[in-house]
Structures are given as C-alpha cells and as structure tokens.
Image: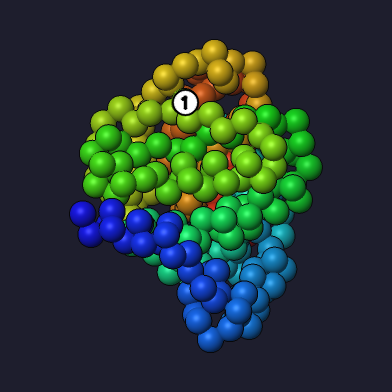
C-alpha cells in the first residue's frame, strides 16, 4: 500500500526541480546532473552490447568478441552508477512515476541517434511476473517503453509475459543469471511481432542475460530481428 500511495502522490503532484536527481534547488536539470549526462555522452562503449568501458579502448568488448547475442545490438543512455542508479532505484522501488517522462525522453534521444533502429516499428517491454507486478504496482520497463514509443511514434506492444517468478538478478553472477532467466518468457500474441523488427526495452543491462532471453523468445515467435534499448548499462572491458 505504501508504494501505491507514493505512486498516487507522484501522479497528482509531479516533481518540482531537477527531473533526474530530484533536487529542488534549481528549476529543471541541475548542474550536477547536466555534467553527469554530458560526461556519459562522451564515454566509449561496446557497439554491440552497449555497455560502457571500464578502461580506455574501442571496438568490441571482450565478451562480445567471444560470443554471439540473439539481439543485434543494445544501446543505453549512461552507465548504471551515481545519479542514474539512484534514479532507477527511485523508479523501481519507490514508485517515482514523475520521473518517467524525462527518463523515457533520454531513452528516446538515444534511439533517435542510432541508425540501426530506423526500420523498427515495435517496442516490447521486458515484463515482470504477476507477483512482482502486484507488489510493485507497475512495470518500470513498461512505463519507460510506453514513453519511448509515444515520443518516437512507434507501436507499444507488450506481448512478452513472465512465465514464473525468478529470484532477483541483482545478487547473482553471470552464469547464475543466465540459468535463472532461461526459458522464463513466453509470447501472448506472436502475430504482433512475426516478421517485424523489434526493440526490447528494459531499465538496466548488466550481464545481458535478461535481454538475451527476451530476444530469444521473440525470435522463436517469428520476429525478424531484435534490438535492445535500456536506460542504464553496466561496465565491461574493451578488447
């Protein structure tokens, strides 16, 4: 109930001040958040998985050199750290719906900057299980995906469903995450994605296990090609 009332307050009384960190000291994006986003915009990242490099380098990351993903590529707004990490946590765990237009707008800007997305017409959010959705009151990937779809004029198509509850990914290593999420999605209406290029939207990309599982499910259902788009991504090492 606490999350419900917090979400209601956010909707009735939209946040004033900085739309990213929540500071009320300034109107609009504060100086600290402006610097963070400007710096993130210049950081090198892997052109396939979209994760940001932890050391100087260019080209593919070490992981993408040795494996093939079921999605073509993924893009993120900024690294999953500092201000953006806090914003994701406020959205997921405190029902901070007032931040969705700004966060979704950042994702839409990333989408528009990537030429590979030009032929994509369908956006599909990574789903929550029924239990997690009931507990949280909304799907953070869903509200972000809906915002991006509206800004970019794409079709918001929530056809993925979570088959069963799985332990939270946050405390698992890469191998455990892959095993945890494998075969955990199904498609409600395959005809909506069959033969189409699809963007899967999630809040965070860390190991890529969730994005890969969602992409595999969509490809098995007949999607022509799958891309990823997230608000934040972890770090990785260049080749």
Nearer the observer, 143 or 195: 143
| Horizontal relation, residue 42 to residue 129: left or right | right
Residue 66 lies in what quarter of the image?
Answer: top right
- At mark 1, the secondary structure is loop
| Residue at the bottom extreme, as displayed | 25
| Horizontal relation, residue 183 to residue 153: left or right | left
- Residue at (54%, 43%) from the top-left corner? 145
- Residue at (48%, 60%) from the top-left corner? 98
Residue 19 makes an appearance in the image: yes
Residue 100, compared with residue 54, is above or below; it is above
**10 Å crowding of disc 1: few (<14), some (14-19), many (20+):** many
Residue 224 lies in what quarter of the image?
Answer: top right
Residue 86, compared with residue 145, is above or below; it is below
- Residue at (55%, 50%) from the top-left corner? 230
Residue beneath disc 1: 159
- Residue at (55%, 64%) from the top-left corner? 79
In the picture, the quarter occupied by the N terminus is bottom left
In the picture, the quarter occupied by the C terminus is bottom right
Residue 83 makes an appearance in the image: no
Residue 17 lies in what quarter of the image?
Answer: bottom right
Nearer the observer, 44 or 93: 93
Residue 146, compared with residue 3, is above or below; it is above
* Colour scheme shown: rainbow
Residue 198 picture location, percent across and down: 61, 30
């Amino acid at each position: 109930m606490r999350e419900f009332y917090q979400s209601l307050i956010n909707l009735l009384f939209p946040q004033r001040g900085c739309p990213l960190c929540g500071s009320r000291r300034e109107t609009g994006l504060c100086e600290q958040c402006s610097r963070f986003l400007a710096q993130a915009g210049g950081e090198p990242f892997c052109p396939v998985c979209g994760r940001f490099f932890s050391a100087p380098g260019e080209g593919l990351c070490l992981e993408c050199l040795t494996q093939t993903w079921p999605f073509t590529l993924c893009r993120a707004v900024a690294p999953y750290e500092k201000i953006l990490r806090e914003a994701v946590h406020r959205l997921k765990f405190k029902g901070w719906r007032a931040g969705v237009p700004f966060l979704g707008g950042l994702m839409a800007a990333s989408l528009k900057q990537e030429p590979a997305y030009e032929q994509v017409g369908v956006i599909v959010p990574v789903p929550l299980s029924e239990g997690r959705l009931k507990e949280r009151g909304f799907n953070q990937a869903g509200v972000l995906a809906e915002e991006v779809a509206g800004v970019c004029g794409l079709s918001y198509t929530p056809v993925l469903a979570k088959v069963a509850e799985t332990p939270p990914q946050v405390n698992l290593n890469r191998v455990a995450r892959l095993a945890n999420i494998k075969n955990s999605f199904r498609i409600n209406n395959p005809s909506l994605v069959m033969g189409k290029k699809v963007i899967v939207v999630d809040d965070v990309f860390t190991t890529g296990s969730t994005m890969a599982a969602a992409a595999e499910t969509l490809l098995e259902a007949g999607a022509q090609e799958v891309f990823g788009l997230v608000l934040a991504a972890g770090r990785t090492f260049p080749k």
